[in-house]
Structures are given as C-alpha cells and as structure tokens.
Amino acid sequence: MKNIPVLCVSGTSLAQAYESALIKLYHEGTRFKTQYDKPGDPLSIDCTMNITIEEPETDPMIHHAFPGGIEDLKEYVLELKGFKDHWVKNMNDPKDTRWEYTYHGRLAEYGSWKEMLDGEGSKSVDVGFKIDQIEHVIRKLVDQPFTRQAQMITWMPNMDVKVYDPPCLQSLWYRILEDDKGIQWLNCNIRFRSNDAWGASFMNMFGFIQFNKEIIAAEIEKRSGKPVKLGRLNWQADSYHIYGKDIKQAKEMLFDRVEDMDLEQRVFNFNDPFIREMYNSAEEMVIKKIEAYDQSHA
C-alpha cells in the first residue's frame, strides 16, 4: 500500500458518529509504526479521518466505549475553559517538567509563553505577544455571522518544532447559518494533526462540543440577542489511529460486541437526569483535584 486511507463517516449524534469512525478505522485503516511504540507493541491502525456530527447537542451523546468516566469528561471540559492554564511550565527552566501548553492557553493567549526572570527572587512572566483568539472569533461572528475568517489556531512554529509532544489540535473554524425562524446555527470545523481514536478522540469531541456551546455560542447569543444553537461539527484528523497496545481493549469493549448488542446498550443519554447529575457534581471534585496538584507542586 502506498496511500494512507482517507475515511469519512457521519452520524446524527456524537456517540453514533464516534462509534462509526472507530469501526471504519478498524476495518479499513492501515498499519503503522509510531514514535511512541515500545518493544513488542503491535502496529497501530491508522487513517486520515473526516467525521461529521450532524446534531452535536442530540442524544445519545456519550458512548460506553472510551477509556474514562463521566468525571473525566467534566475535567476535560474545565481544562478547555482554562482551569489548568497555570500548569504550563517555565520555558527556560530545565527542571520544570510541567506541560508545554494547554489548548485554552493557545486559544486565549496565542503567542505568549512563560519564562523565568533572572536574579534573586525570580518569578514566572509571560513573554511574546498575546492574542485572545476566542474574543476575536466571537466578535467576528456577532458582527458578520457569515464571515469565513472566524478561525483559531494553536501551532507556534518558534516552539512546537522543538517540543517532544506538540499540540495535536491545530485549528477551529466557525461560520453561522440563520434559519427562517431566526435561530443561528453555529457550524464548526476542527482539525487535529494527530488524534488518538481510542484513548482521546471521544473526550476531545465531547469537550469541544461543550466549549462551542458554553463559550462560543453562549457569548454570541448574549451579544447578538439571537438564539444560537450548535449546527454540524466536522472533525478532521490527519492521523486518526488506535495504538497497537490498545487494540485488544478496543476489541473487548467495542468491536467484538457490536453484532450482539443494540446501540442503546452501548450509549448513555447525556440529558438523563442521573448522568447529568454525575457530570455536574463532578466539578467540585475536579477543582479539589487541581488544588491538590497545585499544593503538591508549589
């Protein structure tokens, strides 16, 4: 084989589209080595994937087959809102092993990074320039909903060509359609250069659906005075892959069960009162977890 497969799927809800993408990858993807393989690991299954979620706010939203729980989904959403931005390390301190970046940090403060001032009593300061891309996107869409310029990026070549694990998320692009009832539908394209289909993609997609709803759409609605709902989400991954080490778990949790289980047995409704209560109540626990990390790494 000389070409990496380009696969396309769509589904009404997140859970349906996610499952379709995994199954298509499993059956039609190609085998690849990765730079993260350990000796003896099987080859990964890989492709370029295009996923369209037609109604991102529609249930069933949550799929059983992802390596995490409801609390993890809440933690990721809070991370996308900036709750862990202070975990980014000082770039000129070789002893600082914290994160190179956060997605929220790249979107809300693009161009900025942290360095340590020299001298006694030194402290971390932001250097470079700062662009709040989130604010610019919201402003553009309020002023001109049909603009093609409402875009955010994460890639910073001056840093990312040198780091071990640069951002997987590359860009977010938005445009609004208004229907004959005056409802504005926020359409979104999100591109990842690399997306761990089993270990991360569900959480990524769920997180950015909530980000689009709670951060982008809600603020546009507030400023424009018009109702804003989520239109289709198009998810593009240059490398959509299941690592070889995860194939066994994916088979046990999904691929070997599809023929013997109804869809209803493989999904949760996010709007189920019990699931929603678990999700909402997890916020306090996640905040305490972040605070405990902060204290232990002070």
Image (spheres, rainbow, N blue to C red):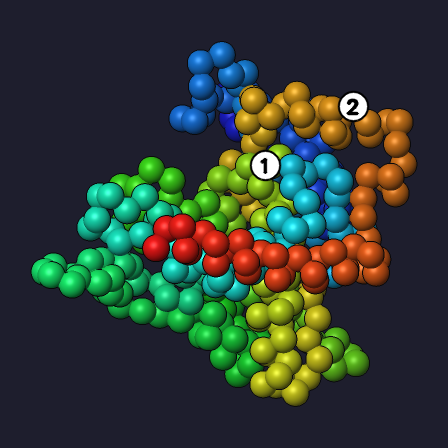
Q: Is residue 227 visible?
A: yes
Q: Residues within 10 Å of mark 2 (few under 14, many from 20)?
A: few
At which x and y percent is residue 172? 51, 59
Q: Secondary structure at mark 2?
A: loop
Residue that label 1 marks: 199
The label number, if any, that marks residue 147 in the structure image: none
Q: Is residue 157 visible?
A: no
Q: Nearer the viewer, residue 162 or 143?
A: 162
Q: Residue furthest top?
A: 40
How crowded pointer 1 is (Cα within 10 Å; few <14, some 14-19, many 20+) is rated as: some
In percent of width and height, residue 6 lies at 59, 35
Q: How many marks?
A: 2
- Residue type indicated by callout 2: Asp
Residue drawn 64% across the image and 67% down it? 213
Determine which quarter of the picture holds residue 249: top right
**Residue 65 shown left or right of residue 295 in the figure:** right
The quarter of the picture where residue 261 lies is top right
Identify the residue shown where x is 38% and y is 40%.
165
Give percent across and percent down for residue 105.
41, 61
Tell me the amino acid under the disc marked 1.
Gly
Q: Write down the residue under mark 2.
A: 256
